[in-house]
Amino acid sequence: MKTTLAVDLGGTKLAAALIRGNEIIEKHQVETQSSDNSDVLRGALRDLLIPLSDRADNVAVASTGIIDNGVLTALNPDNLGGLNRFPIQTVISDLTGLPTQVINDAQAAAWAEFQAYNAHYSNLAFITVSTGVGAGLVLDGKLKTGARGVAGHAGHMLADPWGSRCGCGRTGCVEVIASGTAMGRAGVPFFGVETTGRDVYTHYLAGSEDAAVIVTRSASTIAQLIADLTILLDLDAVVLGGSVGLAEGYLQLVKDALSLLPTVYQPELLPALSGADAGLIGVSLWAGTETK
Ligand code: BMX
Ligand code: ZN
């Protein structure tokens, strides 16, 4: 059986794993260094991938951003420290000497979750709430990547026309209200300038009412996004993942907000079974299918 070197490049972490089937044999992870200098990312990829590439037959990459023909273009460059364009496929195939395929991280995770739920839900959306808000769609049992790699970027659908400006250039996107980054920003007046989304969540779990307002606003915004996607696409299920999406109690908050809506807006709402490895596993499975 083929061994795939799977890579997950997110706004917060860069992970690499050797995967056979859907079993992770070995995994390494570092923090994504926020920089608009592409040499920084190139260096981090080299350090992480070179020690593993000898044992792999191919590379499969799940990356934040729009992936069009192997080139990463950030929809929201703020999530990558200002880095906007990066030829990720060529960089990695040159580094490793291996055939390399790349798709968006949330698209990859959607494919992982579709498989993890035994292909039971033919029409499924995966939503990750983490540095940004990403999403991937599986419709009629097929992963939708889009003609230009954009399909599924639901974090940039409208949540509030009078909201703040998003890093993508639009005003009032879901991501600018609901992401971990947005939660951290909203927490600054209460918890200090260095506040992160994780800090806000910790305060929420400790009983802070200010933090509860921020976390509930994020969860309600995600619930409305789920309702929009469901009414648009007639979804069977929505799977929630990401560091915020999988945080203690968050899924329940989204469920509570969704339960206030008419039933036609309420798909089955499920946790990501592959957890933080959804991107790695999903892209490895997807690469296997694509090259069969
Ligand atoms: C952003 C966008 C998406 C990504 C999502 C989640 C960029 C760089 N990324 O909406 O492509 O899927 O964030 O990304 O424009 P994560 O880093 O939070 O996993
Ligand atoms: Zn946006």
Image (cartoon, rainbow, N blue to C red):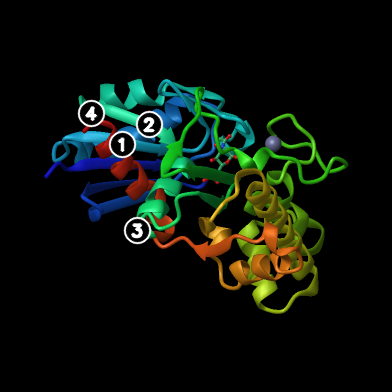
Query: Dot 1 lies on which element?
Result: strand
Residue at which label 4 appears:
96
For the residues marked 3 and 4, what is the alpha-carbon distance in whole angstroms?
Answer: 33 Å
For the residues marked 1 and 3, what is the alpha-carbon distance in whole angstroms?
Answer: 22 Å
Mark 2 and mark 1 lie on one chain; the one further toward the N terminus is: 1
Is 239 left or right of 276, judged from the image as shown? right
Inspect the image, locate mark 1, and give the three-letter code of the amino acid beneath it. Ala
Query: Dot 2 lies on which element?
Result: strand
Residue at which label 1 appears:
60
Which quadrant of the figure contains the N terminus? top left
Disc marking residue 72? none
Give percent across and percent down for residue 20: 19, 49
Decide if residue 272 is in sight here. yes
For residue 157, above or below residue 211: above
Mark 2 and mark 4 lie on one chain; the one further toward the N terminus is: 4
Whether the residues at callouts 1 and 3 have beta carbons within 8 Å, the answer is: no
For residue 124, above or below residue 269: above
Mark 3 and mark 4 lie on one chain; the one further toward the N terminus is: 4
Which of 166 and 253 lies nearest the eye of the viewer? Answer: 253
Is 55 left or right of 118, judged from the image as shown? left
Give percent across and percent down for residue 15: 37, 47
Inspect the image, locate mark 2, and give the three-letter code of the amino acid beneath it. Val
Inspect the image, locate mark 4, and give the three-letter code of the amino acid beneath it. Thr
Give the foreground label among 3 and 4: 3
For residue 260, above or below residue 180: below
Give the foreground label among 1 and 3: 3
Residue at x 40%, y 23% (from the top left corner): 70
Inspect the image, locate mark 3, and give the three-letter code of the amino acid beneath it. Asn
For the residues marked 2 and 4, what is the alpha-carbon distance in whole angstroms?
Answer: 14 Å
Mark 3 and mark 2 lie on one chain; the one further toward the N terminus is: 2
Q: Residue furthest left?
A: 1
Residue at which label 3 appears:
118
